[in-house]
Amino acid sequence: MKTVQKLLAFVGLLSLSALFIYALQDAPTDENFEKKLINDYNVYALQVPDDLNFAGEQMPLKNPDILERMDRELLVNTYWQSNGLLMFKRAKKYFPIIEPILKKHGIPDDFKYLAVIESGLTNAVSPAGARGVWQIMKATGRENGLEVNDNVDERYHLEKATEVACKYLLKSKEELGSWTLAAAAYNAGNAGVSRRLKEQNVSNYYDLLLGEETGRYIFRIVALKEILSNPAKYGFNFREKDLYANVPTYEVTVDTAVTDFSKFAEGFGINYKILKLHNPWLREPHLNNKTRKLYTIDIPKAGYYHDVQ
């Protein structure tokens, strides 16, 4: 037994010695560090496609200013790799919810990329108070039929918020005359875009001199559209199983107050956290519902969450 122990100790000592020698050989000296930096990481200039469009409206890429601005957004979004991969993952989960609603209202499919740049497909909160995937302001939500208060905020309800975004975009298209201007107005407001068009005596987005955010807005949308439509072209590698999947749910209707959502969730075999993940528009751990309004709550089907109690 002692002989075996000695033999094992000797083998271990040899392994450690070999590892130490290897580490010394592979240490990041100035010379081999620079060599690895050059050989292992490369950044490439990108070719801006000459047929880019938003909602079927061509970008005037022969204009050198437009070309440079488009090039910037392609570069920024291609080489922000972690964010890009997250967009691919979330798009697989949320685009199937957004796309049919856009189609129902006759809104071009490209507007799903507007939601990407607005919120990164998350329930974001802006400094100005906009909320949800579509970044809807409180007044806009209420004007379009959403319930917005401390107890219930339907700006966080993806389907209902997408409906409101569609109404806003259709109105903008009617007032401004193009889908590109309608998209810009989602950022700057219909009145703001109309005023700038009049002040500068031009008729389209690409001729406008705008502030930083609205000036980049369409270019960012088109960049995300191009990258998300062509992952391999821009160096993004993933498998279908790497993308996020939507958990199937069924609907439960409630027309009374709910005093404790933790106990309510337990009745369906889930916990409060899971209930909130699927119903982020429920803002408090209870539902007031003094008017006996009918609410529809999404409950995940059995088998998708384990040991959640």
Image (spheres, grey):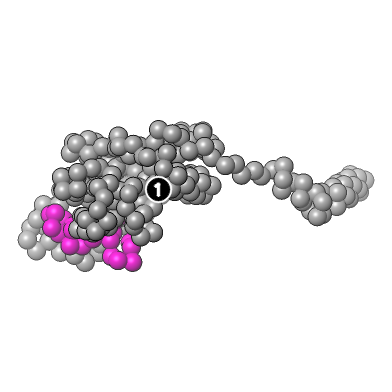
User: 2 or 50: which is nearer to us?
Assistant: 50
The answer to whether residue 121 is visible is no
Give the residue at x 59% y 41%. Answer: 44
> Is 82 situated left or right of 244 in this image?
right
Give the residue at x 23% y 42%. Answer: 178
User: 67 or 188: which is nearer to us?
Assistant: 67
Give the residue at x 36% y 54%. Answer: 215
**Residue at the extreme left of the image, as rendered:** 291
Near mark 1 (Cα within 10 A), the count class, few <14, some 14-19 or many ≥20, is many
Give the residue at x 51% y 33%. Answer: 232
Q: What residue is disc 1 on? A: 220
- Whether residue 138 is in magenta: the answer is yes
The quadrant of the picture occupied by the C terminus is bottom left
The answer to whether residue 176 is visible is yes
Tag 1: residue type? Arg
Characterize the magenta stretch by its predominant secondary structure.
Answer: loop
